[in-house]
Amino acid sequence: MNDFFPQMTSNLVLAFPGFRLYALCAVILVIKMFGVGLYTVRTRSRLKLAMNPEDAARFNAQLVTTEHPDVERVLRAHRNDLENIPAFLILGLIAVLAGAPVLGLQICFIAYTAARVVYSVAYIKAMQPWRSMTFGIGTLCMFALCVMIIIRILS
C-alpha cells in the first residue's frame, strides 16, 4: 500500500500538460547556473588569482583584495542568473499547475531556456546587442507566463 501512493503522485505530476518540458528546462537552467559558477573558478585559476589567503597558498595564486575585471564579468552574469532564473522556475511551475495553455508554456519554456543560455555566453564574451536582446526575450517570456497565470486564475 505504501508503494502505491508515491507512484500515483509522481504519475499525476508527470501527467500535467507541460510539466515534462518545464522539468527539462529547469534542469538545463540549473546546470547552466552551475556552469557559470564553475567558469568563475576557471577564470580565477587561469589568472592565478585568489581572494582568500588559504586559496592563494593552496593554488600558488596571487592574493588580491578586488576581483579582476574578467572575473567580475562572470560574477555579474552569475548574479543575473540568480536574480532571474528562480522567478522563472516559480512562474513556470505555477503556470503548469494552473493549467495554462500548453502551446504558450512550450513557447515560453523553450524560448526562455535558450535565451538564458545565449545570454550567459553573450554576457561573458561581451557580445552586444545579443546580451540585451536575449535578456529582453527572457523578460517577455516571464511576462507572458504571468499573463497566462492571471488569465487562468481569473477565468
Image (cartoon, helix red, strand yellow):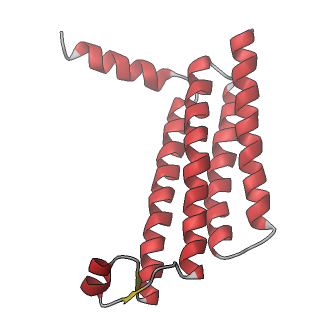
Q: Quadrant of the C terminus?
A: top right
Position of 23 relative to 58 (above/below)? above
Q: Is residue 146 left or right of residue 20?
A: right
Taking depth in this image into account, of 79 and 139 the one nearest to the observer is 79
Position of 36 relative to 152 (above/below)? below
Instruction: Give the image location of residue 20, x and y in percent.
Output: 50, 34
Instruction: Give the image location of residue 103, x and y in percent.
Output: 71, 31
Number of numbered discs on residues: 0
Q: Is residue 12 left or right of residue 145?
A: left
Q: Residue at x 50, y 58 (%)?
A: 32
Q: Is residue 118 left or right of residue 133?
A: left
> Which quarter of the picture shows residue 42?
bottom left
Q: Residue at x 48, y 22 (%)?
A: 15
Q: Residue at x 75, y 36 (%)?
A: 143
Q: Quadrant of the N terminus?
A: top left
Taking depth in this image into account, of 90 and 110 the one nearest to the observer is 90
> Which quarter of the picture shows residue 61?
bottom left
Q: Residue at x 39, y 21 (%)?
A: 11
Instruction: Give the image location of residue 67, x and y in percent.
Output: 52, 78
Instruction: Give the image location of residue 14, x and y in percent.
Output: 45, 26
> Which quarter of the picture shows residue 153?
top right
